[in-house]
Image: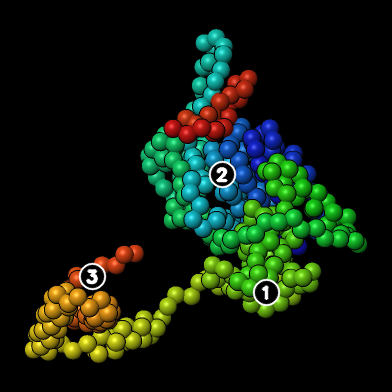
């Protein structure tokens, strides 16, 4: 059974070490934990305390961290998971920078604060140097420049260990009876509700396959991404089989659990060659003999001259019926000529066409405490 830990808002204020420990203790049956992080940062010391606790927890029960925003000290907490996930294609999901503080005091107090700030800076540099296997000078430069990273960049850096496949969700109100729920399940749902309230989420994750059939993920929120091992139901029953999604991917489920998410199938080389073969076959019907082209042009020119002569002759006649008949014939000839001219243009590559009528990262201090709390960007 996988437990859930939610870390959001300001670290040390909205999410504290005590809060994280309480969430873990309230899920004694959990054999592993998923830590969902959405935070702009906060107090550095609190962040390191949460990181240390989760890192030790990972030794007993595997910890997976997943984030939609891990800025400043929240980026340190994210690194606690042995498995670290991000949504594929997410931009500016991870940010690191140097700590800073806002303090008031005499020279002795300011000196103490500066020493504490420097210690925090060194701790961050050492942490990222060890975690990312990058030299200290480079890490210091990244911190100094307030570096934002995408999910793909985090994967390249070794920050993330994997990317989750995003599926288009159709979010709608979906209620279901909760009879015979155990106390543990009710507690888990309550924690989910708190998370929803903090993030303005009201609905569970519901996906529609290519036929309009709804796949309901009762343990995921509408902002989550469907992934392997997630529970899924169809018409209130455990999902079973393959479900083709509108984006071309396929969700495979067995006994109500996602076992695989197959990506969109790319066209094979044989398919491409077959398509090219069809096009080539069509092109082969067009004659390539220059003599034939010249002959067709001469025939068309002769028919144009013939039509013009008939028009000139008829224009001198006083017989209205003959004029009308000639006009109808001229329309027929015009249509015939346009068809042949189009065919000729295709043969000789002509452009002929007929004409128709138609932050600054806010790492601050409270009573001298170092905070890494980022809201606005440069």
Q: Is residue 326 left or right of residue 37?
A: left
Question: Where is mark 2, residue-wise?
Answer: 70
Q: Residue 346's spot in the image, x, y percent?
A: 21, 79
Identity of the residue drawn at 55% across and 56% down:
87
Q: Quadrant of residue 105?
A: top right
Distance (Cα) linking label 2 and label 3: 59 Å
Q: Nearer the viewer, residue 357 or 220?
A: 357
Q: Is residue 152 visible?
A: yes
Q: Residue 93's spot in the image, x, y percent?
A: 52, 47
Q: Is residue 112 left or right of residue 218?
A: left
Q: From the viewer's perspective, is residue 375 above or below residue 230?
A: above
Q: Quadrant of residue 238?
A: bottom right
Dot 3 lies on which element?
loop
Q: Nearer the viewer, mark 2 or mark 3?
A: 3
Dot 2 lies on which element?
strand
Q: Is residue 245 left or right of residue 198?
A: left
**Tags 3 and 1 in contact by the CB under 8 Å rule?**
no
Q: Nearer the viewer, mark 2 or mark 1?
A: 1
Distance (Cα) linking label 2 and label 1: 31 Å
Question: Where is mark 1, residue-wise?
Answer: 253
Distance (Cα) linking label 3 and label 1: 55 Å
Res 353 label? 3
The residue sitting at the right extreme is 180
Q: Nearer the viewer, residue 368 or 277?
A: 277
Q: From the viewer's perspective, is residue 35 above or below residue 340?
A: above
């Amino acid at each position: 059974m996988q437990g859930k830990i939610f870390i959001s808002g300001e670290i040390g204020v909205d999410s504290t070490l005590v809060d994280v420990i309480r969430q873990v203790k309230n899920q004694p049956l959990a054999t592993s934990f998923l830590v969902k992080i959405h935070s702009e940062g906060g107090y550095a010391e609190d962040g390191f305390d949460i990181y240390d606790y989760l890192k030790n927890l990972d030794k007993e029960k595997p910890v997976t961290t997943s984030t939609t925003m891990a800025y400043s000290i929240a980026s340190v907490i994210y690194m606690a998971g042995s498995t670290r996930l991000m949504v594929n294609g997410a931009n500016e999901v991870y940010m690191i920078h140097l700590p800073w503080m806002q303090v008031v005091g005499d020279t002795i107090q300011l000196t103490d604060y500066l020493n504490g700030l420097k210690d925090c800076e060194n701790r961050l540099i050492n942490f990222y140097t060890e975690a990312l296997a990058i030299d200290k000078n480079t890490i210091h430069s990244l911190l100094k420049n307030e570096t934002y990273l995408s999910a793909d960049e985090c994967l390249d850096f070794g920050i993330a260990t994997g990317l989750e496949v995003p599926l288009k969700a159709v979010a709608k109100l979906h209620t279901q009876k909760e009879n015979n729920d155990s106390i543990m399940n009710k507690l888990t749902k309550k924690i989910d509700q708190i998370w929803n309230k903090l993030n303005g989420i009201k609905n569970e994750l519901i996906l529609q396959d290519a036929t309009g059939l709804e796949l309901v993920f009762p343990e995921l929120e509408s902002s989550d991404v469907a992934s392997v091992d997630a529970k899924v139901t169809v018409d209130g029953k455990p999902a079973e089989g393959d479900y083709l999604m509108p984006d071309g991917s396929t969700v495979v489920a067995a006994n109500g659990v996602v076992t695989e998410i197959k990506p969109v199938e790319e066209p094979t080389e044989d398919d491409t060659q077959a398509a090219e073969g069809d096009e080539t076959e069509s092109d082969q019907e067009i004659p390539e003999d220059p003599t034939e082209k010249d002959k067709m042009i001469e025939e068309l020119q002769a028919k144009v001259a013939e039509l013009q002569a008939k028009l000139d002759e008829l224009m001198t006649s006083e017989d209205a019926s003959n004029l009308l008949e000639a006009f109808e014939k001229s329309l027929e000839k015009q249509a015939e000529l346009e068809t042949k001219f189009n065919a000729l243009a295709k043969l000789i590559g002509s452009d002929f066409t007929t004409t128709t009528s138609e932050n600054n990262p806010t790492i601050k201090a409270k009573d001298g405490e170092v905070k890494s709390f980022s809201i606005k960007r440069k």
